[in-house]
Image (cartoon, rainbow, N blue to C red):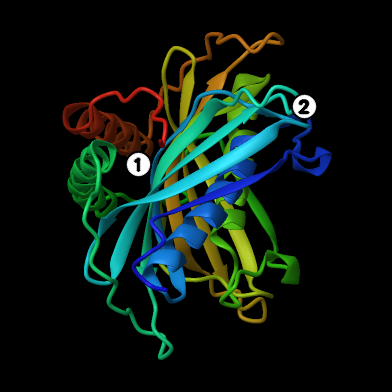
Amino acid sequence: MAGTQRRVTLRFLAAPTDANVRGMVDGGKALEWIDKAGYACAVGWAGTYCVTSYVGNVHFNRPVRVGDLVEVDARVVYVGRTSLQVVCTVRSGDVRTEQLDDNTQCLLQFVAMGPDGHPAEVPRWEPEDDWERAENERAVRISELRRRIDAELAEQTYSEHTEACRETLRFLAAPTDVNWGGKVHGGYVMHWIDEAARVVAERWHGGAAVAVYAGGVRFYRPLHIGDLIEVEARLILTGHSSMHITVHVRGGDPRTRRLETTTHCMIVYVAVDEHGDKVQVRSWNPRLPEDLELQEHAKRVIDHRSKLLRPDPPRRLS
């Protein structure tokens, strides 16, 4: 029944097929799980099919290991007229002890869709406890941050006039990528984003790198099964050990090769050694005007976040 299910929790074991080439479950797979749990929670409250429009403030605190018991908890924290926001937390631990520690937290926004394919009104929601009130206020602050960053994004140019380290992955969207609405699942799109960004990060560093943050995954339009997919990742800023990478996903009919941007985000990777400890990464010093502007853009986005959002500790949904 619409307007009654405020929370969904998925529990399962991390499988060997979830691991990356180093045997750990990477951020992209965690984002798949988050999107599925968030979708179930959103649909449970809205009472109708929902589409992911935004995923933000994603913090990857620690990796999930193959064989871990995984818990993905999703909880409604904000409802608008046709949209709703859900906080998701991934926890994992040894299945023998069931001691679960936080791995990843993020905020997702969904839009409810009616049978006619147009946005549908969502049942009214009010916070019931202190945690929900705090997260509701936080969701409002993040919405304000999004508007500022969206204005920044609209002014940026991405062209071939660059010397930055970049990589483009190309493939066809497969039938196994489908979601419950017949389109490409948003979780798979986020996995592709993570894969492309990791290629750039490890190529630039010349060694291992892990995702620590993903900000502002914006879904502009859906991808369809059979579409030609292009995932372009580009380094735009480096710190002492961090690499800020912007990723664009484009898709379209392979017969025409006219590709439209469907998704965009910025993801941060950190260079690590064989023990998983942070190490210094070589500095990216752009020379071309477009590269210089994108570097400044990344700094402004970081500044917006630091002014508007307090650094939050891992949050337990209780």
Label 1: which secondary element: helix
The amino acid type found where label 2 is placed reads Arg
Quadrant for the N terminus in the image? bottom left
Q: Is residue 50 above or below residue 21?
A: below
Work out whether residue 75 or residue 246 is closer to the camera in this orientation and state it: 75
Looking at marks 2 and 1 on the same chain, the residue that comes earlier in the sequence is marked by 2
Kindly identify the residue that appears in the image at 59 percent across and 39 percent down: 71
Q: Is residue 217 above or below residue 269?
A: below
Q: Is residue 108 left or right of residue 103?
A: left
Quadrant for the C terminus in the image? top left
Neighbourhood count class around disc 2 (C-alpha, 10 Å): few under 14, some 14–19, many 20 upward: few
Disc 2 and disc 1 in contact, CB within 8 angstroms: no
Q: Which residue is mark 2?
A: 22
Residue 60 rendering spot, x and y as whole percentages? 51, 29
The amino acid type found where label 1 is placed reads Glu
Work out whether residue 22 or residue 141 is closer to the camera in this orientation and state it: 141
Label 2: which secondary element: loop
Kindly identify the residue that appears in the image at 68 percent across and 19 percent down: 207
Q: Which residue is mark 1?
A: 290
Residue 154 rendering spot, x and y as whole percentages? 26, 55
Work out whether residue 61 or residue 14 is closer to the camera in this orientation and state it: 14
Foreground: disc 2 or disc 1: 2
Kindly identify the residue that appears in the image at 25 percent across and 42 percent down: 129
Query: Is any part of residue 73 visible from this angle?
Result: yes
Q: Is residue 206 left or right of residue 107?
A: right
Query: Is any part of residue 161 visible from this angle?
Result: no
Kindly identify the residue that appears in the image at 50 percent across and 40 percent down: 234
Neighbourhood count class around disc 1 (C-alpha, 10 Å): few under 14, some 14–19, many 20 upward: many
Q: Residue furthest bottom?
A: 116
